[in-house]
């Protein structure tokens, strides 16, 4: 009888132990379920390290981007300052070359020095323009294009002048670029391409309407005169005569006090040259 009671007691204790284990497992599951069901703000102790890590990462990315932007702005500012200095120097070189010839005559060594400096600086300026992309004015394109042409780099000059036309915002810049590019085409032997540019310059008023009639007449007279001189340089006498005659027709349209009346003397001088070379 005692044996039977002892065996029954052992089984009851084993059963109680299993029930206790199961209860602990259920309690653990309930805790996990409660954690998942809790609102996020009650889980801050768990989420806080993750939030801090993400915040630190975001701040690091932000500061890196700001630093990169500052470097880009500084580099762009430095490039702008350098480009301005180069253009100023390039504009001074032809004047210096003229003065040297006036004072010392034709000195090949001095001419070579001026031309070499112009060549180096004009290419540096062209590289800077490409780096700055659209942040360059039409007249800056013109100045560097003219300097490239001065060194005989007519293809590079034409390419740069064409880029400048895309950013021209007024008739002054557009006319300067078109006239100079016409000369580049003539220098390369592409007379038809040059004449296309001359015609575009003549039609500039269609693109920029509403300007002062006297100013338009003066610009057109000057364009015709330059076109005539370009044709004469290519020994195209009929075209040169035609354009210098057209230029003279605009003289009467200029007001006496207009600042461009000084070009009238240049028109008459060009006409004399054409008459001398085209009998």
Image (cartoon, grey):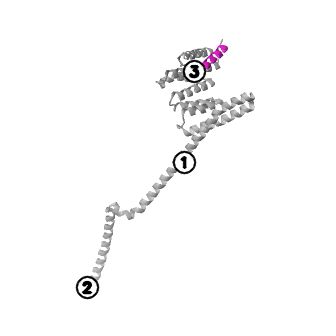
Q: Which residue is drawn at 32% across and 61% down?
A: 39
Q: Mark 3 points at which residue?
A: 261
Q: Look at the image and tell me in which quarter the N terminus lies.
A: bottom left
Magenta-span inclusion, residue 273: yes
Q: Which residue is drawn at 61% across and 37% down?
A: 125
Q: Nearer the viewer, mark 2 or mark 1?
A: 1
Pick the residue in front: 174 or 23.
Answer: 174
Give the mark nearest the N terminus, 2 or 1.
Answer: 2
Q: Is residue 154 visible to us here? A: yes
Q: Look at the image and tell me in which quarter the C terminus lies.
A: top right
Q: Which residue is drawn at 65% across and 30% down?
A: 150
Q: Is the magenta stretch mostly helix, strand or loop?
A: helix
Place of residue 43 in the rendered image (x, y in percent of width and height, measured from the top left) = 36, 63
Q: Name the residue under label 1.
A: 71
Alpha carbon of mark 2 to alpha carbon of mark 1: how far? 90 Å
Pick the residue in front: 86 or 38.
Answer: 86
Dot 2: within a 10 Å radius of its alpha carbon, few (fewer than 14), some, or many (20 or more) residues? few
Pick the residue in front: 1 or 103.
Answer: 103
Alpha carbon of mark 1 to alpha carbon of mark 3: how far? 49 Å
């Amino acid at each position: 009888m005692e044996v039977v009671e002892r065996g029954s007691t052992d089984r009851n204790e084993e059963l109680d132990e299993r029930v206790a284990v199961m209860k602990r497992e259920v309690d653990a599951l309930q805790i996990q379920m409660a954690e998942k069901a809790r609102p996020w703000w009650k889980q801050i102790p768990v989420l806080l390290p993750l939030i801090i890590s993400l915040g630190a990462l975001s701040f690091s990315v932000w500061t890196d981007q700001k630093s990169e932007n500052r470097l880009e702005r500084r580099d762009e500012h430095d490039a702008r300052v350098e480009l301005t200095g180069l253009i100023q120097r390039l504009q001074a070189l032809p004047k210096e070359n003229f003065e040297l010839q006036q004072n010392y005559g034709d000195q090949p060594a001095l001419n070579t020095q001026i031309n070499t400096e112009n060549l180096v600086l004009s290419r540096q300026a062209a590289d800077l323009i490409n780096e700055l992309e659209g942040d360059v004015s039409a007249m800056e394109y013109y100045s560097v294009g003219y300097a490239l042409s001065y060194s005989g780099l007519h293809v590079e000059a034409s390419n740069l002048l064409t880029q400048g036309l895309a950013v021209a915002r007024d008739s002054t810049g557009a006319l300067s670029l078109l006239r100079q590019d016409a000369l580049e085409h003539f220098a390369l032997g592409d007379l038809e391409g040059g004449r296309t540019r001359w015609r575009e310059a003549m039609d500039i008023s269609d693109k920029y309407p509403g300007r002062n009639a006297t100013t338009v007449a003066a610009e057109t007279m000057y364009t015709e005169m330059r076109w005539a001189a370009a044709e004469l340089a290519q020994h195209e006498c009929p075209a040169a005569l035609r354009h210098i005659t057209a230029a003279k027709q605009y003289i009467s349209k200029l007001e006496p006090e207009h600042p461009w009346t000084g070009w009238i003397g240049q028109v008459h001088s060009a006409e004399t040259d054409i008459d001398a070379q085209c009998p």
